Amino acid sequence: MNAGYQKQRLTFITPKPKEGGYPVPGHDTYTKAWASLKTLKGSTRYAAAQVQMEHNREFTIRYQSKLTDDERPEELSALWRGKEHSIESIEDVDGLKKEMLVVLKAVS
């Protein structure tokens, strides 16, 4: 993985804990990662439009064990360019614990 291609900053956030049963505005930073954005082109773009996944974005980041299914919190979301995105999936790309593929969906 070439670190020079990772120019996008992802911040993974969790909501603040409730106080007295009431939600507290804001969020806590869980972890940060540099990422490379993969855009949909050609036939994959048309296939995504057919299943209404055109607002999904794919990022490749370095492997972080705290983002695996076993360790990450339930209500984890991500910030990219100041906008909150829900996490569709986070997968280990090749099983060698080098790269992770993060699929985000814009929250409207």
Image (cartoon, helix red, strand yellow):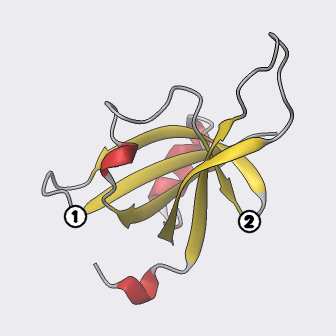
Q: Residue at x 48, y 61 (%)?
A: 59
- Image quadrant holding the C terminus, namely top right
**Residue that carries the numbered disc 2 in the rendered image:** 81
**Residue that carries the numbered disc 1 in the rendered image:** 98
Locate residue 22 relative to residue 72 in the image: left or right: right
Image location (x, y in percent) of residue 22: 85, 15
Crowding near pointer 2: few (<14 within 10 Å), some, many (20+)? few
Q: Vertically, is 41 above or below 74?
A: below
Q: Nearer the viewer, residue 39 or 50?
A: 39
Image location (x, y in percent) of residue 61: 40, 64
Which picture quadrant has residue 18? top right
Q: Residue at x 54, y 80 (%)?
A: 7
Q: Residue furthest bottom?
A: 4
Q: Residue furthest top?
A: 21
Q: Vertically, is 80 above or below 77?
A: below
Locate residue 29 relative to residue 84 in the image: left or right: left
Give the residue type that dot 2 points to: Arg
Q: CA distance from mark 2 to mark 1?
A: 25 Å
Q: Residue at x 30, y 59 (%)?
A: 63
Image location (x, y in percent) of residue 81: 74, 65
Image location (x, y in percent) of residue 16: 72, 33
Residue 22 makes an appearance in the image:
yes
Q: Nearer the viewer, residue 41 or 29?
A: 29
